[in-house]
């Protein structure tokens, strides 16, 4: 008799109705709100005289997408047209309905997928939604967390439930040990390079295997975050002692309540013998730091490699896409990545702006200076991380090296800092690199924070192992 997967356990516990076509009505336990959709949904309910169905403990709200990251920002300062009004609307509506809102200078403020876990808001076995495509980040806690649109945000507020298409199941088993200066970001980029951005379209991913078990919660969140680039809304990692230790530090409950919850959470893992619709495996033992060369995360090679020739891409459509990417990125086939100069470096985003990311970058930057002409910026993922980094002196390392040290927010992951990087070549710790993502004409190379830091120092794409003495 086959066992049950982690996904099936959470889905069946929350399904309250079945509809034709593989759809189901799911109870939604918790939701994070940001200013681009949350404020408007709450304001509409206020205008109509409705009361949300979700309780105060089921909502955590923060303004992150449009919020300025300037060191002297005010409570409603924005990087986007109309952003200040959206921020103010979210704040006001949360006050009216009694929902927790994290002001921009509060330690709880940050990017939703960073701040939520830090505040103990994400729990194993729950369903969790947010109006952002990278909500799957927090599936690292064994929560069925997924992105929803603005209309669905309003539906959850009104009904505490959604109609959802049931996905197929996929397990990605990761084995081997990461080498020096190789991180979970590199693992995700390698999966994308080998399998493409449609890898998990229509599937829920469960990351498993000895490598996953060895990863910190921060590294697991990076891995699940990048699942959004694989075509899925869902990524899961079974909760274990690493998860429980993190929750003991963050969940605002008595030790007795937490330990009782942990007893139930221990049963959430996938049972032996459970089957998946698709299985993929990757051994990371020989993996090197990865860098994207094109306009999709699947356009990735090892940092010591070369830009591929589109002729070798296979079908005509893939070849045409690679040729267009080369034109946009202004690169040539067979060009060594290590020869590519950069204009700017960015460390931030819900992918790679946690404390361990900043530590990895600072270890490369310490005692060194950013290359002449390179613009470098760091925006910590939350104000708590920013404070922790400053306690450790990491901010001094970044500033001495020539990085701007900003406050928390989504920042220039999606070009929110305005035209400052227009037409520049940027190496970035973010998750997406499509045309104009970080500004008009901006050419983005995705990499780990360590690779970003090493490249900022040399002024060209650089293997971080060469500066860390690890080659």
Image (cartoon, rainbow, N blue to C red):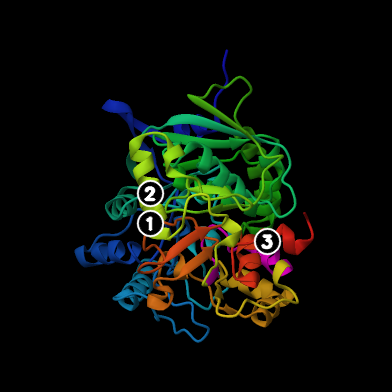
Q: Can residue 259 be seen here?
A: yes
Between 351 and 110, the one nearer to me in the picture: 351
Tell me which label, 2 or 3, sits earlier in the chain. Answer: 2
Quadrant housing residue 313:
top left
Q: Marks 2 and 3, how far apart in space?
A: 36 Å
Label 1 element class: helix
Q: Quadrant of the C terminus?
A: bottom right
Disc 2 designates what residue?
323
Above or below, 185 against 6 in this view is: below
Q: Can residue 119 be seen here?
A: no
Disc 3 designates what residue?
356
Q: Are marks 1 and 2 in contact (CB under 8 Å)?
A: yes
Q: Residue at x 38, y 76 (%)?
A: 418
Label 2 element class: helix
Relative horizontal placement of residue 459, taking residue 43 as reference (left or right): right
Q: Position of residue 382 (x, y in %)?
A: 56, 68
Residue 346 on the magenta span:
yes
Outermost residue toward the bottom?
A: 72
Outermost residue toward the right?
A: 469
- 2 vs 3, front mark: 2
Q: Residue at x 47, y 84 (%)?
A: 73
Q: Marks 1 and 2, how far apart in space?
A: 6 Å
Local crowd size for mark 3, using a 10 Å CA cut-off: few (<14), some (14–19), many (≥20): some
Q: Marks 1 and 3, how far apart in space?
A: 35 Å
Between 226 and 443, the one nearer to me in the picture: 443
Q: Position of residue 183 (x, y in %)?
A: 66, 51
Label annotation for residue 327: 1
Q: Position of residue 332 (x, y in %)?
A: 46, 54
Relative horizontal placement of residue 329, taking residue 303 as reference (left or right): left
């Amino acid at each position: 008799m086959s066992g049950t997967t982690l996904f099936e356990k959470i889905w069946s516990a929350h399904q309250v109705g079945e509809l034709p076509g593989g759809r189901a009505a799911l109870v939604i336990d918790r939701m994070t709100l940001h200013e681009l959709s949350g404020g408007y949904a709450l304001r509409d309910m206020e205008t109509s005289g409705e009361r949300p169905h979700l309780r105060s403990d089921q909502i955590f709200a923060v303004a992150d997408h449009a919020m300025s990251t300037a060191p002297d920002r005010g409570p409603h300062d924005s990087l986007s047209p109309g952003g200040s009004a959206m921020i103010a609307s979210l704040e006001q509506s949360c006050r009216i309905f009694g929902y927790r809102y994290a002001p921009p200078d509060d330690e709880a403020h940050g990017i939703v997928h960073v701040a939520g876990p830090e505040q103990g808001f994400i729990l194993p076995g729950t369903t969790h939604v947010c109006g952002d495509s990278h909500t799957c980040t927090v599936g690292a806690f064994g929560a069925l967390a997924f992105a929803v649109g603005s209309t669905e945000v309003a539906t959850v507020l009104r009904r505490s439930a959604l109609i959802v298409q049931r996905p197929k199941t996929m397990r990605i088993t990761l084995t081997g040990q990461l080498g020096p200066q190789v991180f979970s970001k590199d693992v995700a980029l390698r999966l994308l390079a080998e399998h493409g951005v449609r890898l998990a379209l229509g599937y829920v991913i469960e990351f498993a295997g000895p490598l996953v078990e060895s990863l910190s919660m921060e590294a697991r969140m990076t891995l699940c975050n990048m699942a959004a680039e694989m075509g899925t809304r869902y990524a899961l990692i079974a909760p274990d002692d690493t998860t429980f230790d993190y929750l003991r530090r963050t969940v605002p409950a008595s030790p007795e309540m937490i330990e009782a919850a942990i007893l139930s959470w221990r049963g959430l893992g996938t049972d032996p013998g459970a089957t998946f619709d698709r299985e993929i495996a990757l051994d990371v033992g020989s993996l090197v730091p990865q860098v994207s060369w094109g306009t999709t995360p699947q356009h990735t090679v090892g940092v010591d490699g070369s830009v591929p020739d589109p002729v070798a891409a296979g079908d005509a459509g893939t070849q045409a896409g690679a040729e267009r990417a080369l034109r946009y990125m202004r690169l040539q086939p067979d060009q060594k990545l290590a020869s590519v100069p950069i204009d700017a470096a960015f460390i931030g985003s819900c992918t790679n702006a946690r404390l361990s990311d900043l530590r990895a970058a600072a270890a490369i930057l310490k005692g060194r200076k950013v290359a002449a002409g390179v613009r470098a910026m760091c925006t910590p993922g939350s104000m708590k991380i920013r404070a922790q980094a400053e306690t450790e002196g990491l901010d001094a390392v970044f500033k001495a090296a020539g990085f701007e040290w900003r406050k928390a927010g989504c920042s220039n992951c999606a070009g929110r800092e305005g035209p400052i990087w227009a037409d520049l070549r940027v190496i970035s710790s973010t998750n997406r690199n499509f045309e104009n993502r970080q500004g008009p004409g901006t050419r983005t190379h995705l990499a780990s924070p360590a690779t970003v830091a090493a490249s900022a120092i040399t002024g060209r794409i650089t293997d971080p192992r060469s500066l860390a003495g690890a080659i």
